[in-house]
Image (cartoon, rainbow, N blue to C red):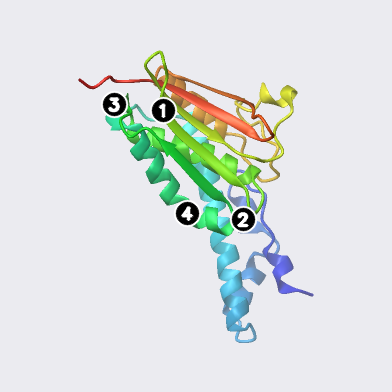
Amino acid sequence: MDPRADLRPIALDPCDPRPLLLHPHSDRRLLILCSDATSDDQREEFREIVTSEIRRIDGTVKEFLDFAKPRESRLEKINLTEVVAAAVRQLEGQVDKGGVTISQRADSTLTVSADREKIHQVVLNLLLNAIDASANGDTIDVTTRATDDDRAELIVRDYGKGIDPSEAERVFEPFYTRKPSGSGLGLAIVKSIVESHNGWVSLQAAPGGGTEFRVILPLIKEN
């Protein structure tokens, strides 16, 4: 029997860690890592699997906490394009692993009054959603620009399979997801953050296939 079968993801309720502690293979997982019979390559593979699971669970818990009790926003003047660029850099590893390219078209003068960390989270969630929707070799287009009515606009466009119009109305609902391991909170958090900044977010089927998310925020006009 392949020992890796004992390292399958565990379905975990973030409020109840007992499945992780009482899982029938928990002891065996530790034995595999510690056993002298386990090769170095297998041991490293198992470590990566365990680490990945811990990160997944930690991310799910964080999403629940962020949605259930968001902290008060700390507003400051921020450059939206710089925040987007930082989020793109943060995801370089996942982008490379997925064989995806991110193309950025940016207005470098977009200043908004916002909580930097929260807007960073908005961009991360939209990019992660686009990466999940993309196939190897796809491009994700990220655009920041000023609108004609003096607002800052962020557009994240993927070239994936797109979304059915009936589902488009539900993607911002808490706990709604089409992903087997998704929490269904990523886009709900995006909507909550954007609306708390007096903005709005929308999505639509993109011309030629894929999905396009648009975030609108009040723009500060610099003299």
Residue positioned 60% across, 72% down in the render: 45
Tell me the mark number nearer the camera, choosing from 3 and 2: 3
Q: Amino acid at mark 3?
A: Leu
Q: Amino acid at mark 2?
A: Leu
Residue 3 visible in the current orientation = yes
Which image quadrant is residue 15 in?
Answer: top right
Q: Residue 217, position in %: x, y?
A: 41, 21
Q: Amino acid at mark 1?
A: Arg
Tell me the mark number nearer the camera, choosing from 2 and 1: 1
Q: Amino acid at mark 4?
A: Glu
Residue designated by label 3: 75
Q: Earlier along the polypeptide chain: callout 4 or callout 2?
A: 2
Q: Residue 153, position in %: x, y?
A: 44, 25
Residue designated by label 2: 20
Q: Quadrant of the C terminus?
A: top left
Residue positioned 41% across, 50% down in the render: 89
Q: Secondary structure at mark 2?
A: helix
Question: On the picture, is 117 further left or further right than 187?
Answer: left
Residue designated by label 1: 145
Residue positioned 58% across, 46% down in the render: 139
Residue positioned 58% across, 63% down in the render: 50
Residue designated by label 4: 92
Marks 3 and 2 sit apart, C-alpha to C-alpha, by 39 Å
Marks 4 and 2 sit apart, C-alpha to C-alpha, by 30 Å
Question: On the picture, is 20 further left or further right than 92?
Answer: right
Q: Earlier along the polypeptide chain: callout 1 or callout 4?
A: 4
Q: Residue 78, position in %: x, y?
A: 29, 31
Which residue, as the protein is rendered here, is positioned at the far left? 223
Which residue, as the protein is rendered here, is positioned at the far bottom? 36
